[in-house]
Image (cartoon, helix red, strand yellow):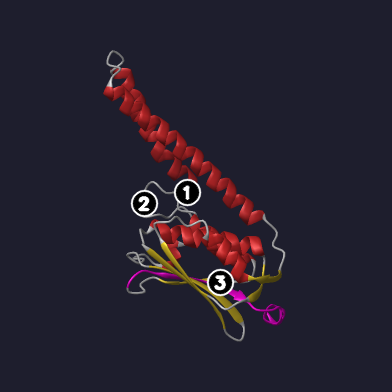
Amino acid sequence: NGLAHELRNPLTVIGAYVRRLARERADRSDKWEEALGGIYSSIRRIETMIERVEGYERLVNMQPCLTHVDLRPVVENVLKGIGPDVVVRLDSPGSLVALADEEHVRTALSRIVENAVQTGTREIHVSLGQDGTYAYVSVRDFGPGVRDKVQTILAPFFSTDPMRIGLGLTEARIAMVKIMGELEVVRQAQPGAVFTLKLLLDSRRSERS
């Protein structure tokens, strides 16, 4: 249902521009260029949407392999992908090992970081820590914060930007659930928001469960 709704919007745009071209066949100037640009951008949006849905399906079907993962190198690798316009600060111990699947952690963290960048923040603070049971990777942005409920922003195809697909935070949540972790959200951190990946330090907690 979500995919059908999302595909309907760009297809409506394509239809409108095609009808305009049909009416203005004799005038192949700026209006034609505008119409063709609208068609091409809508087609690219559909292609991107399909690719993201296929990636979402791969993530759901991927079988996790739980091992002891040093989180710091994973975090550092993800942060390298942030552009030069955003200042990144990493607060981390030398090593922090958790029971996890590296690919799932990387996916979850990448989606959280992408979401932070999309807020328009100029800074991102990432901190690693632990208590007696869990390891934590927290990502704080300094954007406008989150107005909607946590259940809403984690739902598939939800986005406040009509040009975005709305699967990033859903993928982050699913990746964490599959490795017995959690995604915690502070919607208003005054300023910004904080998204925290919560990972088991060892197998004892999962065995008791």
Q: Secondary structure at mark 3?
A: strand
Task: Kindly identify the amino acid type of the residue bearing the numbered disc 3.
Answer: Glu
* Residue 101, placed above or below residue 3: below
Residue 207 on the magenta segment: yes
Q: Which residue is mark 3?
A: 182
The image's mark for residue 67 is: none
Left or right: 46, with 94 as reference point: left
Quick one: label 3 or label 1, which is nearer the N terminus? 1
Left or right: 110, with 200 as reference point: left
Quick one: label 2 or label 1, which is nearer the N terminus? 1
Q: Secondary structure at mark 1?
A: helix
Residue 100 horizontal/vertical position (percent): 66, 69
Q: Which residue is mark 1?
A: 2
Frontmost of labels 2 and 1 is 2
The residue sitting at 57% across, 52% down in the picture is: 56
Frontmost of labels 3 and 1 is 3
* Residue 41, placed above or below residue 137: above
Q: Specify the segment rendered in magenta.
A: 191-209
Q: Which residue is mark 2?
A: 161
Label 2 packing within 10 angstroms: few (<14), some (14-19), many (20+): few
Of the pair 117 and 43, the residue shown nearer to us: 117
